[in-house]
Structures are given as structure tokens and as C-alpha cells.
Image (cartoon, grey):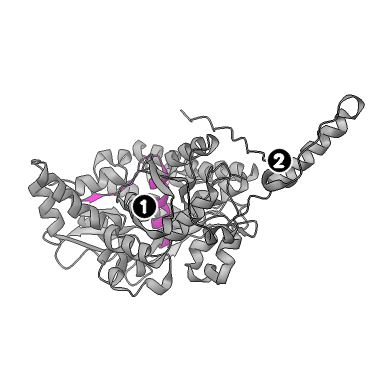
Amino acid sequence: MEREEPVIVRPVKPGDEGGPRPIVYAGAGAAVAVIVVVLLIVLIGGDDIVDPSWLNDEASGKVVYCSGEDVSRSQQRSVEDFNRSSARGTAEARLVTNSPKADEQRLKYLELIDSGDCDVVYLDVIYTPEFASRELLYDVTPYLERDDLVSSFNSQMISTATYAGKLWGVPKAINAGVVYYRRDKVRGGPPRTWTTLVEAARPSGEELPGLRLQLDAYEGLTVTFLELAYAAGADPIVSEDGETANLDQPGTRKALELLQNAIAIRAVPGSVTRLTEENSLDLFSLGRAKFLRGWPYGEARLNADADAARLRGSRSAAARRNTADNVGVEALPPWVEGGRRVAILGGSNLVIPRTAKNPEGALHFIDFLTSEQQILRDAAKASLAPVRPDLEDREAVRTSPALAAVQDETLRLRPPITSYWKVSDAIASRLRRVLNSGQGKETFPEELRELQAEVQRELDQQ
């Protein structure tokens, strides 16, 4: 069942910072008074723009940092580093986490913003335009334009933070899919195309299916599908102006056929349409697959999970250590040998909700988290790709196979539209049903035409 959208009531701050206060007149002038109040609400409430001069003063107060599940512990380390640093002044940061799934995070963030419980949100790049369009965020353009700071960030990440010509978030981390493989079970590295990878994952005899990826009805399935479709040469599934859906095309059919074939030949387990990132990573860590389509943070997690299992005396410790010691990682394969290795640009922007109780402290916190030291710490400790191109040749990045793999990929954007969550939900729900049904590829054109019509309806309602 679809969860009800939280109703966001934007705070009105008449008279803030010495501004004019609405005057209420009695009697015959009441209607005029209402108009005056409404005008003042619009004028005053619209000034939620960060002021870079806030950084001239010492940070103070509590800063609540909201993120999804901290699967790499990078968010907790950020909080601890800030609280130990001289940059914090007298401020103190605290982490609040929720689901690892992007679509579930979105709903939780809306609830937290509505209640004013976040000063900074680690917001998935796909939701930044929507939150900005709903007037939920501070405009951070003045901060990023200060000393041309904006030019130091990856241009694609900046585009994800842009809406209506303004910037609503500060890039924090780039994410993109990669392939992990067992060097002790896969000779010569992973196969060189998606088709041969699926074939290599086909089990023989009593073997387990060899590939783990994410095909549950959530954002993970949408991303996996788009990775395959764009590798196969598909055009953007939504036009650049955000007005026209384009789901029924040869590249998307090829992607759907490959996924259905992977299930049919047992290259992936029957439970694949119930697998998420964490499920997939855990099964691979336990030695139950030769290949994993995962994220760069898995590089650090495989070792951490093996060490944690040993410390708690788990029976899985030996298997996890064996995987961690024998893992290799490469960019996602191309569709045809020698073709482009296509991945979907993931990652997060740091945003300040308009309901933030401490926006000044939030800006200090964001400034700290996007410093060179913190970006390189995230690369070294959590395998998070840097959002600043000038840091890509640093040792922490160069020595990470997962981050090197990301640099070998052509990153494609998901549709930067305000109704993206509805579009993604339509795609993931239908594709999961099709994959579960086992229906033949002759039905795929009709399924994709119906999906295209469904997505078009969502675009028409933007």
C-alpha cells in the first residue's frame, strides 16, 4: 500500500531579524488586513537564503544531521570529526538515521522536515529538485558562488542540485554501480560484457546462482534497469525538457530481456526480486555468489563485516574473511565488448531544510563536511567517490579499486524531474511484476508501451 504523503506546512517568520510585522485591523478593514498579511508572508517567508557571512561567526547550538542508514559509517565519522574539530566552535552535531532505501528515505525526510527535526539532510541527488520545488530547502547559491566554490565540484553533481536556476544543495558524495567478483573463482577477471557475465553466472550441477543484484520493487531495480538499458544504447527515458516519456525502445527491451534470461537460466536466484543492496552484499560476503552488482562502499564493508564476524565469534567469520581476501572489483561491463561502461550517477547533496532550527550551524557543518580533508577521509574509509575532480588523483582515491572502477565509467543522470519518485515507482513496480511472471519477451513491447503511458501521465501532472 502506498504511504500517504506528509503535508508540509512551510514555516512563516513574520518580523524575523527586525523585519516588518503584520498589522491586523479590526472591523471594515479586516479584508485588507488579510491581504497585507498574505503579502508579508510571501515576501518575508521567501527569503530563506543562506548568508555566507554566517561562517564569519563561531558555530553554536545543536546541529541535527539526518541521513539514510549509515551503511558505511561515513556519516557517524563525519559527526565525530566535526565535534572534535576547531571548526565547530560551541556547536555539537548529532546523527539521525533511517532506511537504506532511497524511496523510503524520501518519505522519512518529508516527515522529519515537517516536524523541524533536521538541520542538515544527506539527500539523494534524485530528490533535490523535488524538495526545492516544494519550497522545503534553503537556497545555497550565495554560499556556492562565494569565491567561485561551485566550480570546484563535479559538474554533473552540481546539475543535480540545481532547480529553477538556483542551487539548493552542496554535493557531498558520488555513487555509481560496480561489479565485485571472486578472484579465486573467476579466472582472468569478470567477463567483458553484460551478456557473458550473466552466462558465466549460470550454475552447473549443485552450484548456487552466481550473480547477485537488486530487483526488488524500489529504486534499486530502476537503477539496475537503466544501467543495462543505457549500456545497450537506449535514449533517455524522459526527454530533456521533462515532458515526454520514452520507455518503449530497443535498448529498454534488451535490458528487460537480459534480466528475464538471467532469472530463467538461474544466473540469479529466484529470490532476486526481493533483494536490495544490503541483502545482495551480505550474500556475496557469505560466499554465496561469484559476482555482485554493488556500490563502492562494499569494498570497505566486506573487510569490516569479516572483522566484526570474527570479533563476535560468528560461524560466518571464515566465509566472510575468505570473500574479503579474494575480492576483485571492476567497472560495470559494457553491452558489447569495447563499448562504454555505463553507470547511473548516484550520490547525495547536503541540504538545509527551511524548518531547520539552526541554519547557521548547518552551514558551518556543511562547510566542514565538504572540505578536502573530509572528502578524502570518505574516500579512504568508506570508498565514497570524491565530488571534487581535483582530488581524483590523490592516494586515497588512486589506491581504491572501487573508486578507480567508477572513474572508468560513463555516468548517466536519471531524469532530473520533480516527480521522479512517481516515475521510478511506476518503473520498478511494473518491471518487478513482469520479471516475477516469467512471461516471454514477445510481451515486452506491450508492457513497455503501457509503462510509457503510465509515466507520461505522471509527467503531464507535474
Quadrant in the rendering for residue 62: top left
- 419 to 251, vertically: above or below: above
Q: Residue at x 63, y 38 (%)?
A: 11
- The amino acid type, in three-letter code, at marker 1 is Asn
Q: Nearer the viewer, residue 249 or 59?
A: 59
- Circle 2 packing at 10 Å, graded few (<14), some (14-19), many (20+), is some
Q: Disc 2 designates what residue?
A: 14
Residue 287 in view of the camera: no
Which disc is residue 124 wearing?
none
Mark 2, secondary structure of its residue? loop
Task: Please report the bounds of the magenta region as a residue range.
Answer: 209-234
Mark count: 2
Left or right for 237, reference 346: right
Tell me: 353 left or right of 430: right
Q: Position of residue 18 (x, y in %)?
A: 71, 47
Give the CA distance from mark 2 to mark 1. 33 Å
Question: What crowding class fits label 1: few (fewer than 14 Cα within 10 Å), some (14-19), or many (20 or more)?
Answer: some
Q: Read off the residue under disc 1.
A: 83
